[in-house]
Image (spheres, rainbow, N blue to C red):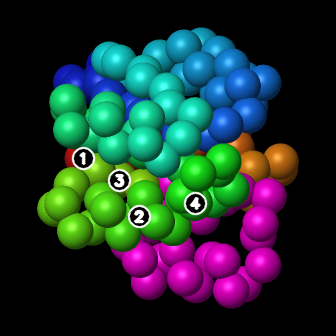
Amino acid sequence: MRNKKASVLIVDDHTNFVDRMVGLLDEAGGTSRISTAGSYQAAVHILEQHKPDVILLDISMPDKNGMDLLQYISQNNCQSTVVMLSNLSATYYQQECKRLGADYFLDKTTEYELVTGIIDRFNNN
C-alpha cells in the first residue's frame, strides 16, 4: 500500500501526448494531482502556485524551451523530480538537461511508459 501519492505537472504543447500521459498516470494510480501546461509561461504560473513532486517536461515548446524551464526550476529551488520526455534524444540534449538539473531523460516516443516506475519510486522513498 502506498503511503503517499505524487503531484505531477506535465509540460508539453502536444495535447495528444498530454492526454496519453494523463490516461497512463490515472490508470497506474500513484498520483494525487495532475496539472498540465502547454508552454513555459503556463508552467511558471503553475509552479508559482504549487510545487509538484514530479515534473514531466518536453524540450520543444512554442515560447521558451524545456531547458529554459529547467533553469527556472533550479534558480527557484524547486525540489521536484524532473523527467525530461523528448523526441530530441541526441546525447547533447541528454547531457545538457542533466547538467541543468534533470533527474531523468526519456525518449518521448518509446520510453514514456517508464514514468509510472519513476513515480512509484518517488512514492516509496
Residue at the spot of label 4? 65
Left or right for 16, reference 31: right
Count the numbered circles shown: 4
Alpha-carbon distance for marks 2 and 3?
11 Å
Residue 88 picture location, percent across and down: 77, 66
**Label 1 amino acid?**
Asn
**Residue 28 vertical position relative to residue 71 in the rendered view, above or below:** above
Mark 2 or mark 4: name the one nearer the start of the chain.
4
Residue at the spot of label 3? 81
Q: Does 92 appear in magenta?
A: yes
- SS under mark 3: strand
Mark 3 or mark 1: name the one nearer the start of the chain.
3
Which residue occupies 62% across, 40% down? 12
Indicate which label's residue lies in the foreground, 3 or 4.
4
Residue at the spot of label 1? 125
Left or right for 80, reference 18: left
